[in-house]
Image: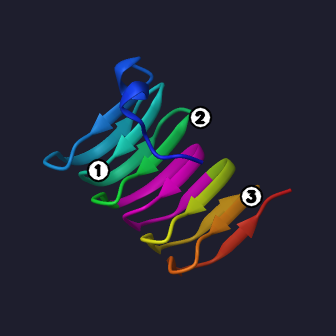
Amino acid sequence: METLKASDAARGQTTLIGTSIVIKGELSCSEDLYVDGQVEGTIDPKGNRLTIGPNGRVKANVTACAVVVQGKLEGNIQASDRVDLKQSAVVTGDIAAQRISIDEGAYLKGRLNIEG
């Protein structure tokens, strides 16, 4: 999985939560979501991809098709496809997905459930 490129945002296919944004509550959308700010609550991009950028600080339970974590996530992840924890990822919570990749240096405290 790749991180967000400027051309993706320009096409309107990705919602971007910037570094200065703070959201508390339920966050849902019907396109890919890139979070580089702070979110507290629940995140559901309706079967699309969620990317937590390197500045992202998320305290939420996440339901998505695919999840890429580069920043901090405190909460459970339910992914229908895959989860990618990049080198800078810090995740505290349980992960359920069909596939998972964990880069060297990533931190995970929680349980993994690989669903077949």
Name the magenta segment's main secondary structure: strand
Callout 3–callout 2 Cβ contact below 8 Å:
no
Looking at the picture, tell me which residue is in the foreground, 23 or 9: 9
Q: Which residue is mark 1?
A: 36
Magenta-colored stretch includes residue 64 = yes
In this picture, residue 105 sits left or right of residue 97: left
Neighbour tally class for label 3: few under 14, some 14-19, many 20 plus, Cα within 10 Å: some
Q: Nearer the viewer, mark 2 or mark 1?
A: 1
Bounds of the magenta span? 59-78
Residue located at (59% from left, 72% from top): 103
Q: Which residue is mark 3?
A: 99
CA separation in Å, label 2 and label 1: 20 Å
Q: Nearer the viewer, mark 3 or mark 2?
A: 3
For numbered disc 1, what is the local secondary structure?
Answer: loop
Total numbered labels: 3
- Which residue, as the protein is rendered here, is positioned at the far top? 11
Neighbour tally class for label 1: few under 14, some 14-19, many 20 plus, Cα within 10 Å: many
Neighbour tally class for label 2: few under 14, some 14-19, many 20 plus, Cα within 10 Å: some
Q: Which residue is mark 2?
A: 47
- The correct choice, above or below, for 3 with respect to 106 in the image is above
